[in-house]
Amino acid sequence: MLTRRSFVFTALAAPAAGVLATPAFAMTPEVFAVDGLAIRGYDPVAYFKERTDVEGSAEFSLMWKGAEWRFANAENLADFEADPDRWAPQYGGYCAFAVAKGYTAKTEANAWSIHDDKLYLNFSLAIRARWAISKERFINDANANWPNVLNA
């Protein structure tokens, strides 16, 4: 017998059953982006050339791996376009320390380092300091975890 109570329960449970039948999460994007901007709009090439974080411009931008990448000038844009894997941050711009620990985390443009000619970003300056203590070990761990952490 369908009472009001069982009807309400059935009606509430039906949508939940549909939700449970589909994945409850979507895969994490390959590139960390804020409002569609990789590295929050900072120029990845400038980290190597200028040795600092430099904001890019919408005038010098391109789409790569589902995110907009911005550059400070046409030369940096051309360099990136010619070999994006050379200039892009490791682990899609996610926090290298977090990837080493088996998860993803956002990054800040000023929390960066270059090691063996590769760009690594971190969650914060404090995390970058922790990262620096055992950088080689963390890189090995992050390399082993990437890109599987995108599905975690």
Image: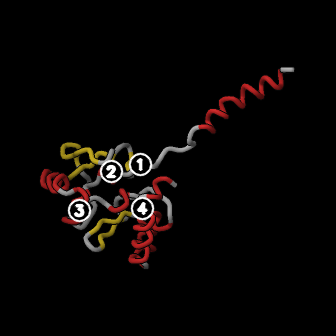
Is 41 situated above or below 52?
above
Q: Counting other residues with Cα less than 10 Å from the Cα at mark 2, is it few (<14), some (14-19), or many (20 or more)?
A: many
| Image position of 132 with respect to 111: above or below | below
125 and 152: which one is in front?
A: 152
Q: Which residue is mark 3?
A: 86
Which quarter of the image is occupied by the N terminus? top right
Q: Secondary structure at mark 1?
A: loop
Q: CA distance from mark 4 to mark 1?
A: 13 Å
Quarter of the view holding residue 85: bottom left
- Estimate the spatial distance between the alpha carbons at disc 4 and disc 3, rounded to whole Å: 17 Å
In the rendered image, residue 50, in percent from the top left (x then y), is placed at 20, 65
Residue under pointer 4: 146
| Residue at which label 1 appears | 29
Q: CA distance from mark 2 to mark 4?
A: 18 Å
Q: Which mark is residue 38?
A: 2
Q: Are marks 2 and 3 in contact (CB under 8 Å)?
A: no
